[in-house]
Amino acid sequence: MATAPETRTALEIAETLLTRADAALEAGDFAAMAPCFTLPYRHSTAEGETRLDQLSELEALFQKMQEQFRSLGVTRIDRVVTEARFAGPGRIAATHETHLFAGETPVIAPYQAISDLAWADGDWRVQASHYTATRDKGHAAALTPDRPGPGADD
């Protein structure tokens, strides 16, 4: 992995990446969201861990999250980086907290995500995330990629 030519702090990098991802989430724009991630991408929640290898898998997860936000009546997503540090050449460990609102009313308890950011293809991207989202209102399941069960290809 190449070393990033950085003068910014880990916090500034994580905040910039999160701002880009938030704009894409709020706009429902997967094409803007996709460059924020590497493939493969590791994604985990209370429901389990998955490795996404294909852009189509990442898009399916994005659409599933969009559906969840609509079902909860989310009108605003506030995400704040609470910690970020360089974890080696071309790597950042970052934590952010997510608050989802319908108007001014929170729709679920705030939750954290712990992410590994990597310098890849000339930019900072999310390589792995662990979401601590509650199972309340099905939110953890909505943040978990769908996978076919055993024997699905038989």
Image: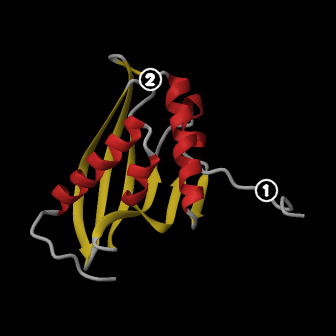
Look at the numbered disc 2 and give the secondary structure of its residue: loop
Residue 95, percent across and down? 31, 53
Name the residue rendered at 16%, 56% in the picture. Answer: 12
- The residue lying furthest to the right in this view is 154
Name the residue rendered at 46%, 55% in the picture. Answer: 130
Task: Name above or below for residue 50 compared with residue 1.
Answer: above
Look at the numbered disc 1 and give the secondary structure of its residue: loop
Q: Which mark is residue 149?
A: 1
- The residue lying furthest to the left in this view is 7
Q: Amino acid at mark 1?
A: Gly
Task: Name above or below for residue 119 compared with residue 134.
Answer: below
- The residue lying furthest to the bottom in this view is 2
Q: Amino acid at mark 2?
A: Val
Q: Which mark is residue 61?
A: none
Tell me the distance, in whole angstroms, between the alpha carbons under discs 2 and 1.
31 Å
Task: Identify the residue position indicated by label 2 in the image.
Answer: 107
Q: Is residue 146 left or right of residue 109?
A: right
> Which badge, 2 or 1, is on the more N-terminal residue?
2
Whether residues under marks 2 and 1 lie with C-beta atoms below 8 angstroms apart, the answer is no
Residue 6, percent across and down? 14, 71
Q: Is residue 71 left or right of residue 102?
A: right
Q: Is residue 126 left or right of residue 81?
A: right
Residue 104, percent across and down? 32, 17
Name the residue rendered at 75%, 55% in the picture. Answer: 148
Towards the viewer: 23 or 86: 23
Q: Is residue 4 left or right of residue 107?
A: left
Residue 70, percent across and down? 52, 27
Towards the viewer: 115 or 15: 15
